[in-house]
Image (cartoon, helix red, strand yellow):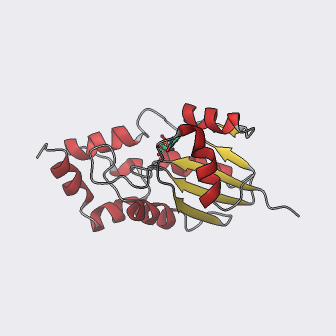
Amino acid sequence: KKIDRGLYIGRFQPYHNGHHSVLKRISEYVDEIIIGIGSAQLSHEPGNPFTSGERIMMITQSLDELPCPFYVIPIEDIQRNALWVAHVRSISPPFSRVFSSNPLVVQLFAEQGISVESPDMYERQSHSGTEIRRRMLAGENWQDLVPKAVVDVVEEINGVERLTRISGSD
Ligand code: NMN
């Protein structure tokens, strides 16, 4: 029987409870999940503070009780949107469906004949990377918006201190 493998793409700067609830839901109706870390080459900038390896730690440690097998793959950006789907295919385990709410991702896959499912997002307002990075810089509570494992990773790498320094808002 063919394995129904789904690809979920995001930047995960950082991984948060919105991603987490979507992935738990997706895991109920696919056999296996591929989590693609977009803009993998970016780190140490205000909008992209964490490396792909750090994002892999956040995701892997948060998902240890996901009911289906999962793979985490870094995907670097390329200069040609028209070739991006081929680029993703060239490095990913094979997949038959894609999950994303990013309009460009939806469009690029649709043009290659792959329909993209946009899962309902969980408390979208507060559960965004932008809001979490803002709270980290402002000294406000961000910990409640991410899985406990993400708090631990950010602490291990002194992530808030890094974000503060590279944002020049010390
Ligand atoms: O849905 P978000 O979290 O925005 O993630 C989408 C990811 O896909 C981003 O990292 C984005 O850079 C990436 N992407 C890259 C290309 C490209 O490299 N040309 C095209 C579309 C999406």
Q: Residue at horizontal 62%, vertical 45%?
A: 85
Left or right: 22 as drawn, with respect to 44: right
Q: Position of residue 108 (x, y in %)?
A: 62, 36
Left or right: 10 as drawn, with respect to 8: left
Q: Which of the 4 image quadrants contains residue 112?
A: top right
Q: Tell me the quadrant of the picture where the N terminus can be found.
A: bottom right
**Residue placed furthest toward the right:** 1
**Residue placed furthest toward the left:** 170
**Closest to the observer: 5 or 105?**
105
**Residue 132 in view here:** yes
Q: Position of residue 86 (x, y in %)?
A: 63, 49
**Closest to the observer: 144 or 19?**
19
Q: Is residue 33 above or below residue 123?
A: below
Q: Is residue 47 above or below residue 104?
A: below
Q: Which of the 4 image quadrants contains residue 82?
A: top right
**Closest to the observer: 157 or 141?**
157
Left or right: 13 as drawn, with respect to 66: left
